Image: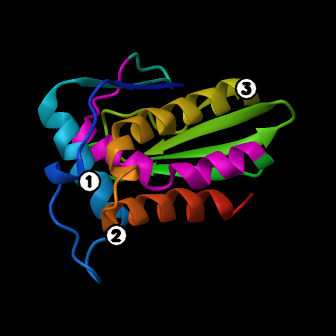
Amino acid sequence: MHIRFQSSRKIETSEIPDYVPDMDNYLALIHYVCDILQESGQCRFEFSGFGKASWPLDIATDLATLLEDLPNALSHCKSGSDFSLELYEQGVEARLEFVRNGAYWRVSCYSSSEVIPNNEHEQLSGDQLLSQLTSLLDGFVGCIEPILDSASPWADVAWAWLRAKSARSG
């Protein structure tokens, strides 16, 4: 399994809709940002593995879905506790289960889609998995750096997502 995200695009607070209390949350922020990134064409999101050289994923839906629980997944990876990530959008519909096995992680892919392998398994070293997940999150955080550095309510939303998710199992 290999996950890679690259972008030089920085998203400014002025590019996303105004924050609406009691309606907006980190999910809205992730989806707003991923929509902008998709439209910009200034980034790459690659996912391969389980016998498929390239999965048919996009940034606006699939990257956004993967990012939703990524800080929590990173915490589990660091602590060595099992976790899963879901790509639940129609057409992909895959669940990746990560089970620690010594210095390695057994990664199982379960999908109800015909384009994504089902019931396939791969093994990654702990360092490989941690590096890929960290790089993915760091790439996204780099894109929202101007938001994180702003006085906007969106900055509070983003920081709360990063802190709360990573604190769950750390």
Type of the residue with mark 1: His
The answer for how far apart the CA atoms under marks 3 and 2 are is 32 Å
Tell which circle, 2 or 1, labels the residue nearer the N-terminal end.
Answer: 2
Q: Quadrant of residue 165?
A: bottom right
> Is 64 part of what is drawn in magenta?
yes
In the image, what residue occupies the spot 15% across and 61% down?
A: 17
- Residue at the spot of label 1: 31
In the image, 125: left or right of 70? Answer: right
**Residue 90 visible in the snapshot:** no
User: Which one is in front, 117 or 137?
Assistant: 137
Q: In the rendered view, how is the structure colored?
A: rainbow
Type of the residue with mark 3: Asp
In the image, what residue occupies the spot 42% across and 65% down?
A: 156
Q: Quadrant of residue 141?
A: top left
In the image, 148: left or right of 108? Answer: left
Tell which circle, 1 or 3, labels the residue nearer the N-terminal end.
Answer: 1
- Residue at the spot of label 2: 25
Residue 81 lies, in percent from the top left, at 76, 52
> Is 97 part of what is drawn in magenta?
no
Q: Is residue 42 above or below residue 32?
A: above
Would you say the residues marked 1 and 3 are in contact, meaning their CB atoms lie under 8 Å apart?
Answer: no
Which quadrant would the C terminus be assigned to in this image?
Answer: bottom right
> Magenta residues: mostly which secondary structure?
helix
Type of the residue with mark 2: Asn
- Residue at the spot of label 3: 127
The stretch in magenta equals 54-78
User: Which one is in front, 90 or 82?
Assistant: 82
The answer for how far apart the CA atoms under marks 2 and 1 are is 10 Å
Q: Residue furthest top?
A: 53
Q: Residue furthest right?
A: 102
Front label number (3 vs 2):
2
Residue 25 lies, in percent from the top left, at 34, 69
